[in-house]
Amino acid sequence: MLPKKTVSEAIHYRRSVRVYDAEKPIDKSIVKKCIELATLAPNSSNMQLWEFYHITSKDIIAQIAPFCFNQNAARTAQQLVIFVSRKDLWKKRAKANLSFLDTTFGANNPKEKQSSREKVARNYYGKIIPFAYADFFGVLGLFKYLLILVIGLFKPIYRQVRHSDMRIVAHKTCGLAAENFMLSMAAEGYDTCPMEGSDTWRVKNLLGLPFGCEINMIVSCGIRKPEGVYGERFRIPFEEVYKEV
């Protein structure tokens, strides 16, 4: 068993590994545990618009590798995790949050007996979320955008309400989960590589993924070979990117 790492150690240890050791398999139950930790990532409005496809079949990995342009990180991977953005599930996720409120505050509470916190939460998932996510071929999004522009002349207001805006929100959420996963893997002494270079349509077709989903990234998993880390880590000087206001 590999020694566990602290958060700081895991962050420093994590590298995008391009070549994995074929002689060192990884435990799929540990990878699954790291995916469970990914679900604890912060996400927009607790909507959890994500799904995770854990690929352990060597045959499926071999079929996916050409769709990742046969990059070494895909060809030598022991396992893959595909992070999928599910903006299309917003109604289901909003309903799940409302059901959770029922377990927290009690179901069918009359409005006059609801606490201010409960009222705000129910209004949020019952009205605000549908306003933000509902769209019809971009038409509603344009209408909402114009409405927000007018209201925004008089007060601060949330402005990202178009279809493209909410798509970005869902992908940011999924990316946060992917980071949780990769750091959790690093803490276990396992290695990963997030791959954006792929033919996502072909991967979706191979796995039979729903039409409305979008692949956020494919993360390969394994244990690094020394040559799998391509040189020293390079980062722009901290002083160049850090701005105190």
Image (cartoon, rainbow, N blue to C red):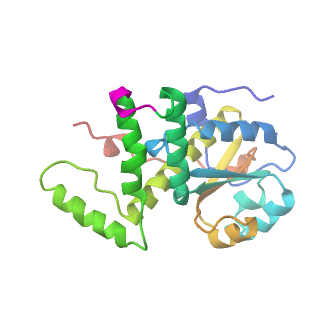
Q: How many marks?
A: 0
Q: Quadrant of residue 143?
A: bottom left
Q: Give the extent of the magenta segment.
A: 109-116
Name of the residue lying farthest toward the left: 154
Residue 60 placement: quadrant:
bottom right
Residue shown at 51% from the left, 40% from the top = 97
Q: Is residue 30 left or right of residue 120?
A: right
- Closest to the observer, 208 or 95: 95
The quadrant of the picture occupied by the N terminus is: top right
Quadrant showing the C terminus? top left
Q: Is residue 140 visible?
A: yes
Residue at left offset 43%, top offset 45%: 125
Left or right position of 127 against 174: left
- As for residue 101 lying within the magenta part, the answer is no
Q: Is residue 221 or residue 136 the one in the foreground?
A: 136
Q: Is residue 145 left or right of residue 209?
A: left
How far across and down, in percent of the image, does residue 32 sit? 74, 40
On the image, the x and y values in percent for residue 183 come to 60, 38
As rendered, which of 158 and 189 lies closer to the eye?
Answer: 158
Residue 7 in the image: state x and y as whole percent.
Answer: 57, 29
Taking the image as shown, residue 177 lies to the left or right of residue 225, namely: left
Q: Residue at x 84, y 50 (%)?
A: 22
Residue 230 visible here: no
Q: Is residue 112 above or below residue 43?
A: above
Spot occupied by residue 171 in the image (x, y as percentages of width and height): 50, 55
As rendered, which of 169 and 161 lies closer to the eye?
161
Name the residue rendered at 12%, 52% in the picture.
154
